[in-house]
Image (tube, helix red, strand yellow):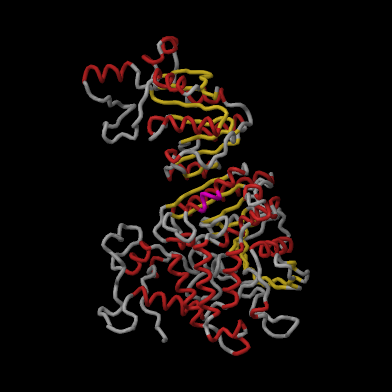
Amino acid sequence: MAIEPTQLKETPKSAIRSSIDAPDSVGIVTPHSYHFDEPLQLRSGKTLPSYDLMVETYGELNAARSNAILICHALSGDHHAAGYHSASDSKPGWWDSAIGPGKAIDTTKFFVVALNNLGGCAGSTGPTSINPETGKPYGPDFPVVTVRDWVKSQLRLMDRLGIQKWAAVIGGSLGGMQVQRWAISYPDRVANAVCIASAPKLSAQNIAFNEVARYSITSDPNFHAGRYLEHNTYPKHGLMLARMVGHITYLSDSAMRAKFGNAGSLLENTTRGNLGRDLRSGTLSFGLNVDFEVESYLHYQGERFSSNFDANSYLLMTKALDYFDPSVDYGNDLSKAFAEGDCKFLLVSFSTDWRFPPERSRELVETLLKAGREVTYLEVEADQGHDAFLMPIPRYSNAMRGFLDNAYKELVTDAS
Amino acid sequence: MRPDQEIIQRWIEPDSRVLDLGCGDGSLLANLKQTKGVKGTGLEIDGNKIQSCVERGINVIEQNLDAGLWNFQSDSFDTVLLAQTLQALSHPDQLIDEMLRVGRRGIVTFPNFGNWKSRLYLSSKGRMPVSKFMPHAWYDTPNIHFCTVRDFDALCEEKNIQILERTVVDLKHEGSLSMRLLPNLLGEIAIYHIARS
């Protein structure tokens, strides 16, 4: 069942302010791979003998090497956070709305580092890499990596880049969990922590969605127990289904009504009476064809994702999410985990995010207050659900810009 | 600095921990940070004011005071401030309890409804006072729990709360001898420094 990408009601091209030539774009960027020979001891007890990390950077590292910001990606993100790889790219990096000259994460002030995490499929060592022991792709033999392992590898990258302390570590969703882990494991290496739309650990509902995603992948006949590459195939339908379910959870009901209804802007009061039931072709098919825009959209998203993302990587990333719970080492009292260090925290949640709702961020705020930490917290009204963390919503962008401006002032003052 | 802020500043110990409930644009906390080296946090619900706090480098948490201070540990602050917000709360008495659970001491300021101008307005016109200072009509005012100096004294007594100091000022935030003598009649803004007994 091949579905053509239909005319999607995404933001019109004219409304996307960023382009390669725009003064607030980082323009053309080139990723670099860093090789690490020192074995990485993993949380699971296994060891990764050597590995590569694919990295992109934006802006200039200052002489004191004090203006570096680490960007941590979420489930399906990678090192390509901003700019374009070539002039023919139709889309910029995944967080281009936030990173660039004059943007909230201002590359005229900061040196921004983004990497693809271990186990990923965008150039860092992961299931599609060759296992040196067998000469074949790791596939399902790639060890389960946790947020803690990622942050350990990010620390090695930091040392390689000669950075003593991050001016800020920033991430949303699963990226926000890495931010928390940085503050817990390496408190003296972080000056500011920005944790967006995240949670101290997943709830049963979150884990349930991840399990649906995993089961749809592993039950695809083309999965071949994870050795699909050796069979020259991949579990396309399983990945599609996983992404379709995931995508529903990243959007809010109101976002979907606005997106798939004739009513226009998300920000206007469009959801009343608009259920987002726009038809794809104007009539019902009275068959099992795609009738509604929302169906077509999900098929398109699933299709696009399945041809770009490795199934084993997806399984690993969801496991990292499920396993994240730093409180286990501290008698289930997370505030004890945050006892060390003096980095400042900025937390942001979004009103319609039901994947990581504001309550979960409030839990983190409470924990950080209990630990006596400096916290700023915003609960932003936004229609876009969990996806809001990727969007340039003014209140959110302005707060991040204001927070980072102060971080910058402090590092300039410290230097003088 | 406004004279009421000057009074508040006198009551704050250097390097202490201060929680400001309804912290506005963060100017008071910024001032206390600069002059007293306090470690401050503010609570606020207005987005623009929160942004001002962020820009000033003041820790601010978006939180409705009517939800209480459940996320704050007991004794986690030295002083909890509540400036010009008491009258807008759903349960002012409960928040006062919360303030003195979270902080050792509290500072509360509120418009004194017992002031002669309010009394005269009500007695002569027979209508709820509306003035430059309290510009809202009774049906759309955020100020739903006005009280007088005497009312607040009574609440403190009922709750066995210690009044460490009490002062009243006028709308220019200036005090006078006559106001000190007849606070409930002449004072326009009441400023209390309170503690658990």
Q: Which residues are magenta?
A: A360-364
Horizontal relation, residue A299 to residue A79: left or right: left
Image position, residue A107 (x, y; %): 57, 59
The C terminus of chain B lies in which quarter of the figure? top right
Residue placed furthest toward the bottom: A231
Horizontal relation, residue A256 to residue A198: left or right: left
Horizontal relation, residue A406 to residue A11: left or right: right
Which image quadrant for residue B129? top left
Instruction: Out of B167 and B32, give the one closest to the viewer.
Output: B167
Q: Does the stretch in magenta take in A362?
A: yes
When the figure is inspected, residue A212 is found, relative to residue A335, above or below; the finding is below
Q: Residue at x 63, y 28 (%)?
A: B14
Q: Taken as a whole, is the magenta stretch helix, strand or loop? A: helix
Image position, residue A322 (x, y; %): 58, 64
Image position, residue B75 (x, y; %): 59, 33
Image position, residue A189 (x, y; %): 69, 53
Horizontal relation, residue A71 to residue A249: left or right: right
Q: Residue at x 57, y 35 (%)?
A: B74
